[in-house]
Amino acid sequence: MKSDPPNRPATPDGRYFVVRGRLWRKSNPSLPAQQREALVRELMEARRLLRGKRSHDERAAARLRVDRAKTALGERGPVWWADGAPDYNRRLVKNTPYADWFEGLGE
C-alpha cells in the first residue's frame, strides 16, 4: 500500500487522513487489491462525469455512482472497523480524540 503524503497524515490507527484540519475516512484496508482497484476506477469515472456540462439527471446519476463507490470502499456508510469505536469522518481533528496526536505533529 502507498505511504501517506506528508501533507495528509494518517491517524495512528489508520482509519483517517487529515486535510486542512479535518478527518477523512480512509478506504477499508482489508479490501482485496483487485476489488479496490475496480472501485477506484469506478469512482474516478463517476467523478469525471460530474465535470463539464451535464443535465440535472446525468449529474444526479454520477453523484449516486460516486456515493456507491465511496461506500463500497468503506469511505462512507458503515465503518469498516469492528471494535465499536465511533466514526469521526469529516470532523475537525481538534474536536476529536485525535486532537493531541495531531497537535503533536507540528512539533
Image: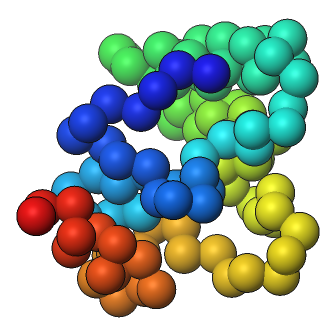
Single out the residue that lies furthest toward the front: 107
Single out the residue that lies furthest toward the left: 107
Residue 7 to residue 88: above or below: above
Lateral position of residue 28 relative to residue 91, left or right = right
Identified at 32% across, 31% down, the residue is 5
Task: Please state, as top left, top right, bottom left or bottom right, where the N terminus lies in the image.
Answer: top right
Residue 52 to residue 68: above or below: above
Lateral position of residue 74 relative to residue 104, left or right = right
Spot occupied by residue 2 in the image (x, y as percentages of width and height):
53, 20
Q: How is the image coloured?
A: rainbow
Identified at 10% across, 64% down, the residue is 107
Q: Is 56 or 66 nearer to us in this picture? A: 66
Q: Is residue 40 visible?
A: yes
Spot occupied by residue 56 in the image (x, y as percentages of width and height):
52, 36
Spot occupied by residue 22 in the image (x, y as percentages of width and height):
33, 64
Lateral position of residue 87 relative to residue 31, left or right = left
Q: Is residue 57 visible?
A: no
Spot occupied by residue 47 in the image (x, y as percentages of width and height):
51, 23
Q: Is 85 or 44 nearer to us in this picture? A: 85
Identified at 75% across, 43% down, the residue is 28
Identified at 54% across, 32% down, the residue is 59
Q: How many marks?
A: 0
Q: Is 51 or 8 nearer to us in this picture? A: 8
Lateral position of residue 18 relative to residue 54, left or right = left
